[in-house]
């Protein structure tokens, strides 16, 4: 049976120049390098400069992804951007990226699923491509999370950073089996009952402000390990694959201990898990494409590899995608 699949033909990422170390943070709040490294695995994070917005990070990542794919902005007919930290309340930051790329056709919009934003955006773009509503898509995760942190709250401000990552998806004809290249399946979930465990303390409609991140870390941690392991299982089963078929897991980079907990539950060896949280911390929707790009560029992830992408964030929202590269 001939089907359409969304094939990843290029990826790229961008981190702002300014680096903030754990030692720098220890001068701001009552914390230490030892505590942060032991509890999270994070050593440094990047912080966007004044006047550097989410769209600027997203555009740089998108340009690098297009270059890796050997394509131009004019080849793209869909931009889906996962972000929680838009440049403005409206219009969609994706349209700012569209303009900055010099793209004058197609459609661009944002998806809001916090740390799961890239997985949700990938699922949306994949559905557009498989339905024939677009041929070439830029899927981007980009955040300036530093702008919604309470820099006096040590339980959250040490965990996050800014950055962007992007992939180019192209529709290709395929056979409809797990031997195909491209996105083999996506599985998404949300549960609004868990709002109070992770949210921003403001919003346009409620307080007319952006608010700051509020989180019950230990409870989020417990939910994250369970839900991520479950959704990876679910997506592999849907793709007709098992844990032993997985070459690489590219998880949302929140906390090294969450990554270890998930791989243990899945019975997947730690050395198959891409870990980049140490040098960019939790960049929310940007973290999965940042980690993916790093592992593709350094040659760990190779064509034909089975890669599982997974993420969880506020809402709660969570999801996974199984991709043959
Ligand atoms: N420096 C030093 N001490 C700290 C810090 C800090 N930065 N932050 C908290 N502490 C203290 C606490 O006050 C507490 O002190 P107490 O024992 O005197 O009360 C102690 O450290 C232990 O705090 P816990 O919160 O129990 O520490 P835990 O081991 O759970 O680690 C952490 C906290 C890192 C936040 C962890 O719970 C976590 O990573 N949770 C997941 C959160 C997350 O990643 N969220 C991102 C969005 S969702 C997602 O991406 C999956």
Image: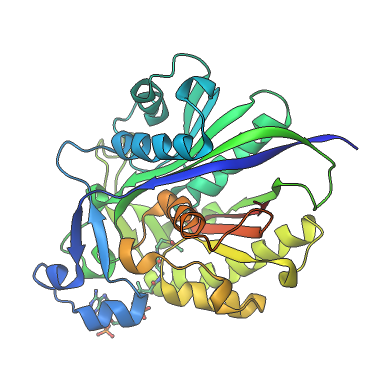
Which quadrant of the view contains residue 204?
A: top left
Q: Quadrant of residue 266?
A: bottom right
Residue at position x 21%, y 69% from top? 154
Is residue 111 visible in this depiction of the protein?
no
Check the image and report above or below for 176 versus 220: above
The image position of residue 290, as x and y in percent, is 42, 53
Ligand number 1: quarter of image: bottom left
- Whether residue 143 is visible to the viewer of this picture, yes or no, is yes
Locate residue 218: give its quadrant: bottom left
Residue with the most extreme left position: 27
Q: In the image shown, does 144 or 204 lie closer to the viewer?
A: 144
112 horizontally vs 154: left or right = right
- Which of these two is toward me, 297 or 223? 297
Residue 18 in the image, given as x and y percentages of width and height: 18, 53
Q: State the quadrant of the N terminus.
A: top right
Name the one closer to the observer, 203 or 39. 39
**Viewer-proximal residue, 57 or 210?**
57
Q: Is residue 21 left or right of residue 89?
A: left
Outermost residue on the right side: it is 1
**Is 47 located above or below residue 208 in the figure?**
below
- In this rendering, the answer to whether 205 lies above or below 149 is above
| Residue at the (65%, 37%) spot, across then down | 126
């Amino acid at each position: 049976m001939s089907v359409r699949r969304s094939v990843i033909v290029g990826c790229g990422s961008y981190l702002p120049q300014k680096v903030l170390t754990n030692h720098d943070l220890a001068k701001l709040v009552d914390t230490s390098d030892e505590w942060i490294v032991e509890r999270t695995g994070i050593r440094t994070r990047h912080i966007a400069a004044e006047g550097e917005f989410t769209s600027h990070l997203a555009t740089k990542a998108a340009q690098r992804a297009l270059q890796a794919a050997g394509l131009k902005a004019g080849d793209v007919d869909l931009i889906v951007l996962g972000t929680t930290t838009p440049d403005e309340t409206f219009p969609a930051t994706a349209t700012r990226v569209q303009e900055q790329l010099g793209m004058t056709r197609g459609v661009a919009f944002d998806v809001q699923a916090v740390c799961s934003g890239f997985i949700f955006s990938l699922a949306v773009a994949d559905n557009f491509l498989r339905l024939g509503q677009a041929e070439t898509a830029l899927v981007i995760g980009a955040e300036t999370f530093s702008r919604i942190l309470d820099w006096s709250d040590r339980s959250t401000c040490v965990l996050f950073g800014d950055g962007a990552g992007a992939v180019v998806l192209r529709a290709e004809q395929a056979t409809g089996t797990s031997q195909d290249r491209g996105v083999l399946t996506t599985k998404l979930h949300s549960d609004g009952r868990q709002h109070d465990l992770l949210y921003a303390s403001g919003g346009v409609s409620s307080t007319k402000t952006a608010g700051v991140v509020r989180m019950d870390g230990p409870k989020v941690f417990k939910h994250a390990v369970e839900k991520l392991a479950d959704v990876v299982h679910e997506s592999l089963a849907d793709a007709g694959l098992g844990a032993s078929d997985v070459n690489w897991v590219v998880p949302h980079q929140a906390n090294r201990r969450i990554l270890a907990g998930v791989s243990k539950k899945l019975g997947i060896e730690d050395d198959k898990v891409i870990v980049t949280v140490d040098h960019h911390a939790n960049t929310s929707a940007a973290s999965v494409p940042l980690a993916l790009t790093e592992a593709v560029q350094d040659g760990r992830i190779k064509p034909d590899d089975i890669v599982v992408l997974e993420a969880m964030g506020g809402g709660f929202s969570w999801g996974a995608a199984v991709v043959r590269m």
